[in-house]
Image (cartoon, rainbow, N blue to C red):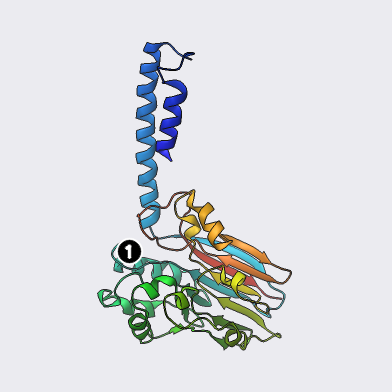
Amino acid sequence: MFAVIFELGTWAFFNEKTKKQVFSTQRRKFLKLIFDSWLIILSISMIFKGFVNAVSVPKVKEIDLKIDKLKENLNIVLISDVHLGKNLGEEFLKALIEKINALNADMVIIAGDLIDTDISKIHYLKLLQNFKSKYGTFYVYGNHEYYNGMEEISAKLKKIQNFKILEDEGIEFDNFTLSGTLDLSAERLGYKASDINKVKQHINNEKFNILITHQPKYVKTYDVTGFDLILSGHTHAGQIFPFSLLVFLEQGFVYGLYELGKNALLYVSSGAGFWGPAVRFLAPSEIAFLKLKGE
C-alpha cells in the first residue's frame, strides 16, 4: 500500500520528465525528501502499531442483543482464531483466560483455529481447563486443526476437563440449545464432511437455538433454518486491510453482526490471535462478549 502511494506521489509531483511542473526543481527536491521521509516514518509506525495490535491480548467488545425467545439473560464469551503455536503461546493464553474469566460469563465458546502447530509442542494445553463459566467451554474445529493433525489435536483436547468439543452435535439446556459443526474444510482435506441434518436434530423450536461453526459461509453452504444465532470466526476481519475485500468475496461476510432473514442472527468474530505476519491493520482482535437479554 505504501509502495503504491510512493509511486503515485512520485509520478504526480516529482517526475522531471513531466513537461508541466507544479514546483521548481529545487523545491521539488526538497519536497521529495520530505515526502520520502514522511512515507518511511508512517509505514514503519503503522507496521509497528499493527504488530502491537496482533500480539496484544484482545480488548473486550460487548454486544447487547434483545432475545424474545430467551426466558432469562444469557452472557456468552466468543473467541476464535487464537492460533496457538510458534507466535502466540503460554503467556498469551494465560492472559486471555484471565481476561475472559473476569467477565463472569455463562459460557465460553471457541469457534475454531485454536491450535496452529503440532499439538505435542503445546505443553501448556491443560490451561484450557482454567476457563470459568456457568455452563463450561465449548469448541468446534477450524481449518487449521485439520492442517496440523486433527486426530491428535482432537484426542488431546478431549482429555481437557470442562472442555466440550461439538462435532456435528448439540446439547439441550433448560433455556436454549447449543450445537456445533465440523468445519467446511474437512471433506476437502479427506475427513468426514459436516452433516447438517444431524446437527439440526438438536433444534428445539420452543427454545433459543445457537449454532457454532468456524466459517461464516457455512450458512450459505447449508440450510441453517431453525437456528436463531450462529457464531463463527475464521475471517480475522481481513487482518490486514484491504484483504477484508478478498475475505468478503470468499466468505460473503467479514466481521460483526449480520441479520439472516427475519429471525436469525450471525456474529462473525474478528478473532483473538493472528495467522501469518504478526500484523493487524484496521482489523483489531477481540473477545466478543454477547449479552443476550431475555424476556
The residue at the far right in this view is: 262
Name the residue: 30% across, 76% down. 119
Q: Indicate the quadrant containing the N terminus: top left, top right, bottom left or bottom right.
A: top left
Q: Amino acid at mark 1?
A: Leu
For residue 145, above or below residue 16: below
Toward the viewer: 48 or 218? 218
Name the residue: 38% across, 52% down. 279
Q: Which residue is mark 1?
A: 88
Give the x, y percent position of residue 237.
50, 57
Report whether 197 appears left or right of 107: right
Q: Quadrant of residue 124?
A: bottom left
Give the x, y percent position of residue 198.
58, 87
Q: Is there any visible trace of residue 108 in the rendered image?
A: yes
For residue 226, above or below residue 91: below
Give the x, y percent position of residue 229.
62, 73
> Considering the numbered disc 1 on the image, is that residue within a helix, a strand or a loop?
loop
Name the residue: 37% across, 45% down. 47
